[in-house]
Image (cartoon, rainbow, N blue to C red):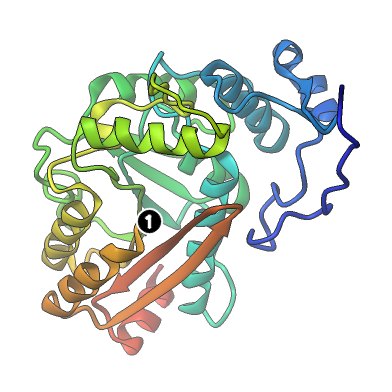
Amino acid sequence: MLQKKIEHPKVKSGFHPRNRHRERYDFKQLIECCPELIPFVKADAFNNESIDFFDPEAVKILNKALLKHFYNLDYWNIPSNYLCPPIPGRADYIHHIADILGGTNQGKIPTGVQVKCLDIGVGANCVYPIIGIKEYGWSFVGTDIDPVALESARKIIEMNPVLKGKIELRLQDHPKDIFRGIIQKDEHFDLTICNPPFHTSLAAAQSGTLRKLNNLKQRKITNPILNFGGQNNELWCEGGEERFVCDMIRQSKQFATSCLWFSTLISKESNLKSVYDALRNAAAIEVKTIPMGHGNKISRIVAWTFLTQEQQSEWMKRR
């Protein structure tokens, strides 16, 4: 027997004001543009339409519907077991980082292909560039250490006229390097973005997934199915998020004049101390931390620049 339908707030809390996903999912609209979603939409215990967010296929088709409805994509797909990111959270990152760029431009967010963004770990899904192009018309370079992921991203670009000519993909041949071998001589980026691997090992990734499933399902789960998928290099690396970001900061110093604002997501608050220490050691001139909260998930963006206010102003004039 269904419980009484709960009336949820029309606008979800915590999202950026420009985020297209602030309102609850309108499954009728989403099904209209993506009928593949029909088998996955069912009434939950409170008689609200929803999908099973623990079903990887349901999550993937929901993403496909969102990208078609809000971002005009004709085609979107990812290989089995690759990371299928939550679109609303990814959109929040793009809007917040756009605000940082606007702060360097007298409050006006720069738009158009002349604004160049480097997506470190673009993945098979290519989601950050898709959102950045739709919302602001930026151009992107997407890097990854995985040729299969890049081939998937390449197909998404080729199958969507709205993306063609606006995203360049580059393979990072040396996994320890983040910018070297990617940023070319005399090349300049206005932004870098990154969603770093979170866990320190595959075992830690599986343990974290089980813990999340147990909490949300309120019963013991023994099979760690990743509802948002993810390959090893997408989910974990030696030292986890903390070491990856600290390495990124250290290496960014070598490209101090090649980029206006570097940035990354930080999922774990306890990693902030090490991140701030690394930024001090690298002599970052300005650092910004932007909190993001979506439901039970709290994360933040950390952004830094090696350019003075005067140099930032000159950068914007040239760009």
On the image, which quarter does residue 31 sit in? Answer: top right
Residue at image position (25%, 83%) is 285
Quick one: quadrant of the N terminus? top right
Quick one: quadrant of the C terminus? bottom left
Residue at image position (19%, 45%) is 182
Q: Nearer the viewer, residue 7 or 237?
A: 7
On the image, which quarter does residue 222 sit in? Answer: top left
Residue at image position (50%, 78%) is 103
Q: Nearer the viewer, residue 78 or 136?
A: 78
Q: Residues within 10 Å of mark 1 (few under 14, many from 20)?
A: many
Residue at image position (22%, 31%) is 203
**Secondary element at image label 1:** strand
Q: Which residue is mark 1?
A: 265
Residue 111 in view here: no
Q: Is residue 314 above or below residue 100?
A: below
Q: Is residue 86 above or below residue 74?
A: below
Q: Is residue 193 above or below residue 64?
A: below
Query: What amino acid is found at the position of numbered circle 1 in the picture?
Result: Leu
Relative image position of residue 168 (x, y in whole percent): 35, 36
Q: Is residue 201 above or below residue 138?
A: above
Relative image position of residue 293 (x, y in whole percent): 55, 60
Relative image position of residue 2 (x, y in whole percent): 86, 26
Residue at the extreme right of the image, as rendered: 4
Q: Nearer the viewer, residue 285 or 198?
A: 198
- In the displayed structure, does residue 222 sit left or right of residue 88? left
- In the displayed structure, does residue 153 sit left or right of residue 304? right
On the image, which quarter does residue 236 sit in? Answer: top left
Q: Nearer the viewer, residue 316 or 37?
A: 37
